[in-house]
Image (cartoon, rainbow, N blue to C red):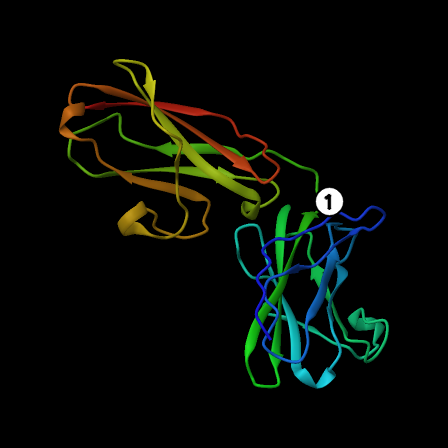
Amino acid sequence: MKNYIILFCFALFFGCDKIPSGIVENPESNFQVLEASAPAGFTYAGGDSSFAVSLKLSSDLGSIKEAWAEVYSPDNTELNSGPVSLKDDGDAENGDAQKDDNIYSGKITFSQSFPNGSYRIDYYVLTKEDVVRKVAENLLQYDNNQIKYPPAISNLVMPDSINAGEWFIFTLRVNDPNGLQDIKRVSFKFIRKENSTSSDIIDMWDDGNLEFHGDSVAGDGIFSFKNYFTQDTKGKTREFIFQAVDRNDSLSNIITHNIYVK
């Protein structure tokens, strides 16, 4: 059987609140993936809320040994400490309606601490030949049902002047009442005061990469950047403008700082 590649083929079905299957690959085995189903959107509703997902296969139950789903957050981090098993056992606790109907189902739990945004659900099978294949994916928009607060930035640490060619690090503290996981981006741009032109927007980092980004500790809410100015900037002033944005696209306050290049 030939392989088929269908990337992000999400059709729109009126009256249906589920995303139709985005089939990535039909395995070289005696079955086909007919549909991968998940809610198009999900809102937290108290406790640890859960929803069902399913993978519909063509007949020949002996063709696969196992099926599962993996869930990835907006920043591409895998959730739930690992895969979610999909069963065709008729057990409602797994979200499965009927045993041996070739529809493999499972329940995925979302916490209110998970950030808002678009989550990706990847579906895998282990074939009878012991080959693992990703066969489909869905996208789900999550709302954690929290009051949406904007982020705030403070405590900029940056010199007022620096020698051209000299490396330096500047840092900025970022807070968000919805948690640091709600931060989408912390960035800056600078204005060349001699001609009022602006740089592109540049990201700051909280990844613990001291060598390249100047950041000491990952995930501590202190965002960093490592930089130097070239010799042709001697005697010139740069105005830096800092801001953060969260996953609801709410903007923080703005901090500005001038630095003179000696």
Q: Is residue 3 visible?
A: yes
Does dot 1 land on a helix, a strand or a loop?
Answer: loop
Disc 1 target residue: 145
Q: Residue at x 45, y 49 (%)?
A: 220
Q: Quadrant of the N terminus?
A: bottom right
What x and y, as percent, mark residue 138? 66, 57
User: Between residues 85 and 13, which one lies in front from this camera angle?
Assistant: 13
Q: Residue at x 32, y 18 (%)?
A: 197
Query: Dot 1: few (<14), some (14–19), or many (≥20) neighbours within 10 Å?
Result: some
What x and y, as percent, mark residue 17? 80, 50
What x and y, as percent, mark residue 22? 65, 58
Above or below for 161 versus 88: above
Q: Is residue 80 visible?
A: no
Q: Name the amino acid type tagged 1.
A: Asn
Q: How many marks?
A: 1
Q: Residue at x 63, y 35 (%)?
A: 149
What x and y, as percent, mark residue 157? 34, 34
**Toward which corner of the image does residue 262 lie, by quadrant?**
top left
User: Between residues 137 and 93, which one lies in front from this camera angle?
Assistant: 137
Above or below for 195 versus 246: above
